[in-house]
């Protein structure tokens, strides 16, 4: 979720959490990262979100944010452990980057690591370290020319994604980067707001009641989280860039 | 807290949380980092621990760990914000390091940063980045010779602590390093266990009822957390190293 005004992610996270072990096989861990400026609150557990008291606490005690990345895990490589739980977090240029991946990269370990090293055993975290390293080598500090950063992320994402399935979300405290390898959807909610119903749960929210006319909220998910809104499907080999609750660019990746 | 068997930190954290805004001036933030292997759960808020629903949730839903670092903040430099909340977290050599500081370093910014950069504005995080950088330059990977690592931490801690008050706790997933500049205390609880009462709260725990004879738990705090146990006071300019719930070394620093 990426917004132009602090927003709580309870509605979307409720939909995602259901897929974390109750109505889906993604029961091997969950994580929710909520930015405050360049820092992040990261809540992670190597257990099913649907049964987690902490996930329930976060739904009942919402924290507003401009940028959030959440993930539910179905393990393919690497056991269910905290170290293997997405989103992964690293600091670069004095900002926090978070990364969540859906899919498997076959040859991630063939690429040599630089200064960032995985803590766990997943291909996903290995790939994240490679992305961080590529950005670190490309720019001495957070680039003023935003498009140069977007292109660098798209380039390394495409390169790593060649031999595998590399759907990912990457947050840098300002942007949400969303690469589509196989499936990804987004929606931008803005005025006039209406109501929406979760796909997997009979939860309805009337966004008109909880927003102001200038609010804009972008939400990206593997599959649409609501059943009565129109989501835009991603094209394989493309990456979206969101900022201020709006799609800023679609790059080949 | 550093232990030889997974232990929950509820008793000690309850004592610390009381000092976070109710019986002490440390109301500008709190953090609790709990290791699982080389990864960490980091709970952070830029608000008073004593009034925090999340801190209460963690007391009511304890998580066992071999190594935990907690902090309550009284701000000296830098506003109350998530980015300025201790403990700070970084990855080095594929492990998570966490750092909490009590005191002020006057000339932290005079030391030039390397690859680690502060996200917030505190001298504390700046100093942590300098420690991480010194370790990174000293060793290509996590050193097999543990004493070499201990000495490197003591050396950089002493160097940075020359112009200021540099009481700190540093965790690397294996060790707890605890440097004393002005005040620091520790206790190692082991068999025969007895009961203890928090200094700031009428909470009593009978450790004999919740331990086995081989358990060992080291707890370090600025001031003793209990009123009926004997804590050992630190000597300024010295650093303790804990592993397996025992004091392994005291180094000049």
Image (cartoon, coloured by chain):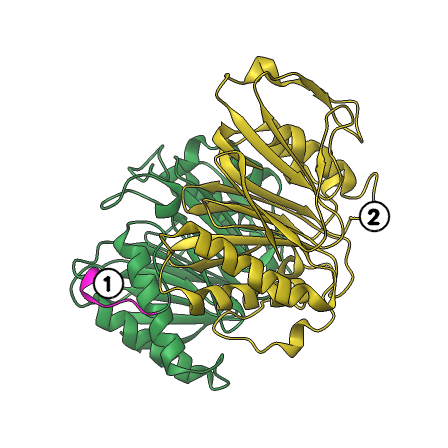
Chain colours: A green, B yellow
| Residue sitting farthest toward the bottom | A145
Position of residue B48 measured from the top left corner of the image (x, y, whole percent) = 75, 46
Residue A230, position in %: x, y?
38, 58
Q: Chain for mark 2? A: B
Point out the stretch of residues depicted in magenta. Answer: A108-114
Q: In this view, does A132 lie to the left or right of A193?
A: left
Front residue of B89 and B99: B99
Q: Which of A158 and A19 is in front in this view?
A: A158
Report if residue A113 lies within the magenta region.
Answer: yes
Check disc 2 and report its element: helix, strand or loop: loop
Residue found at x 74% / y 70%: B106
Does B44 appear above or below A36? Answer: above
Q: What element carries label 1?
A: loop
Marks 2 and 1 belong to one chain: no
Q: Position of residue A189 (x, y in %)?
A: 50, 61
User: Which sits in the foreground, A54 or B114?
Assistant: B114
Q: Is residue B110 magenta?
A: no
Q: Residue at x 34, y 36 (%)?
A: A27
Q: Mark 1 and mark 2 in contact (Cβ < 8 Å)?
A: no
- Quadrant assignment for the N terminus of chain B: top right
Q: How far apart are marks 2 and 1 (CA)?
A: 51 Å
The residue beneath circle 2 is: B25
The numbered mark 1 sits on a residue in which chain? A
Residue underneath mark 1:
A181
Residue A127 in percent (x, y) is at 29, 62
């Amino acid at each position: 979720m990426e917004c132009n005004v602090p927003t709580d992610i309870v509605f979307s996270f409720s939909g995602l959490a259901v897929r974390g072990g109750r109505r889906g096989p993604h029961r091997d861990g969950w994580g929710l990262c909520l930015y405050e400026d360049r820092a992040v609150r990261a809540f992670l557990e190597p257990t099913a979100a649907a049964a987690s008291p902490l996930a329930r606490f976060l739904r009942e005690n919402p924290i507003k944010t401009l940028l959030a990345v959440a993930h539910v895990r179905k393990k393919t490589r690497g056991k269910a452990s905290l170290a293997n739980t997405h989103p992964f977090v690293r600091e670069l240029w004095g900002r926090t980057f978070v990364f969540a991946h859906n899919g498997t990269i076959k040859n991630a370990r063939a690429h040599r690591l630089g200064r960032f090293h995985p803590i766990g055993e997943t291909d996903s975290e290995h790939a994240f370290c490679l992305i961080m390293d590529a950005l670190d080598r490309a720019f001495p500090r957070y680039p003023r020319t935003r498009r140069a950063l977007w292109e660098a992320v798209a380039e390394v994402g495409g390169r790593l994604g060649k031999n595998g399935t590399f759907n990912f979300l990457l947050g840098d405290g300002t942007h949400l980067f969303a690469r589509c390898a196989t499936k990804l959807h987004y929606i931008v909610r803005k005025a006039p707001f209406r109501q929406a119903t979760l796909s997997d749960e009979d939860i309805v929210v009337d966004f008109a009641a909880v927003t102001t006319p200038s609010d804009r909220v972008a939400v990206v998910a593997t599959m649409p989280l609501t059943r009565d809104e129109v989501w835009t499907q991603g094209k394989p080999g493309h990456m979206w860039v969101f900022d201020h609750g709006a799609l800023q660019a679609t790059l080949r990746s």
